[in-house]
Structure formats: C-alpha cells, structure tokens
Amino acid sequence: QVQLVESGGGLVQPGGSLRLSCAASGTIFNISAMGWYRQAPGKKRELVATITRDGTTDYADSVKGRFTISRDNTQNIMYLRMNNLKPEDTAVYYCNAAVQLRWGRSPTDYWGQGTQVTVSS
C-alpha cells in the first residue's frame, strides 16, 4: 500500500523556523493534491496548506505570509517551510495525499502519523 512519513518537527522558540517533510512511498501511480493539516490539544484538525500536482497552493489565513508549501513530484516528497512561528502554531502536523494507485482508478486519501511542533520560550 502507501505510507506517508512526516519528519522535521520539534521544539522551537517564538519567531523561529522549521521545515517539515512528508515522504510518500509504496504502490503509487500518481499523487494529485497534497496538504498539511494540524491539530492542537482540544481542537479539531484544521487545514494549514494544500498544493496541487502543478504547484497551485492555498493557505489558511492564519499562516499566510509565514508558511510555504512545496513538493517534489519526482521524489514524492512534500515540504512545509514555517517561518516566524508563534505559540499558537503548536500542534501535531499531519500530511495528507490523494494517491492514485493505478491508471484509471480514483485517488484514495492517505494520512501520515503526524509530527509534533511546539513553539515555546
């Protein structure tokens, strides 16, 4: 099947930066949309940013101008560069990918296991 593995989380001071990575592996014919979501304690999972295969991006208002999503289609890797981090960015960050397993099949949604980002002084 398909596995999504996130990395790059950690503890950072307010104003600092981190880069998250999400590597997809397995039986993959094509990956269309990919995205980053996050879930803070006691809150619902929320969308952070999305990117289509051709590079069209969209961001939550709370991260616009601070976060940048990108992807490498040849390696099936997605990134999230996070600058000027704030305490309210603290959450578990999850990657999501719409994966087409074979030609002619509809994409299936897959999720990573999550990586913790903590912004604190």
Image: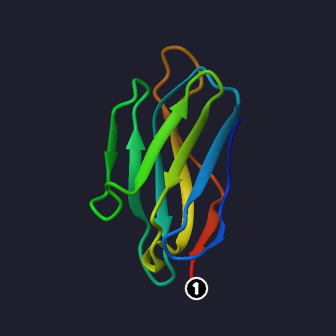
- Residue at image coords 51%, 82%: 41
Q: Position of residue 68 (x, y in %)?
A: 43, 47
Residue 107 appears left or right of 27: left
Q: Position of residue 120 (x, y in %)?
A: 57, 82
Where is residue 90? Give x, y as percent.
52, 75
Q: Nearer the viewer, residue 98 or 55?
A: 55
Which x, y percent locates residue 119?
Answer: 55, 76
Quadrant hosting residue 30: top right
- Residue nearest the viewer, comparing 27 with 114: 114
Q: Residue at x 53, y 72 (%)?
A: 91
Q: Looking at the picture, does residue 4 appear above or below residue 93?
A: above
Amino acid type of the residue that numbered disc 1 sits on in the rendered structure: Ser
Q: Which of the pair 58/82 is nearer the observer? A: 82
Which quadrant: the C terminus?
Answer: bottom right
Q: Is residue 104 above or below residue 117?
A: above
Q: Is residue 9 left or right of residue 34?
A: right
Q: Residues within 10 Å of mark 1 (few under 14, many from 20)?
A: few
Q: Residue furthest top?
A: 103
List the residue tagged with mark 1. Answer: 121
Residue extending farthest to the left is: 61
Left or right of residue 67, residue 93 in this image: right
Q: Quadrant of the N terminus?
A: top right
The answer to which of 62 and 105 lies nearer the viewer is 62
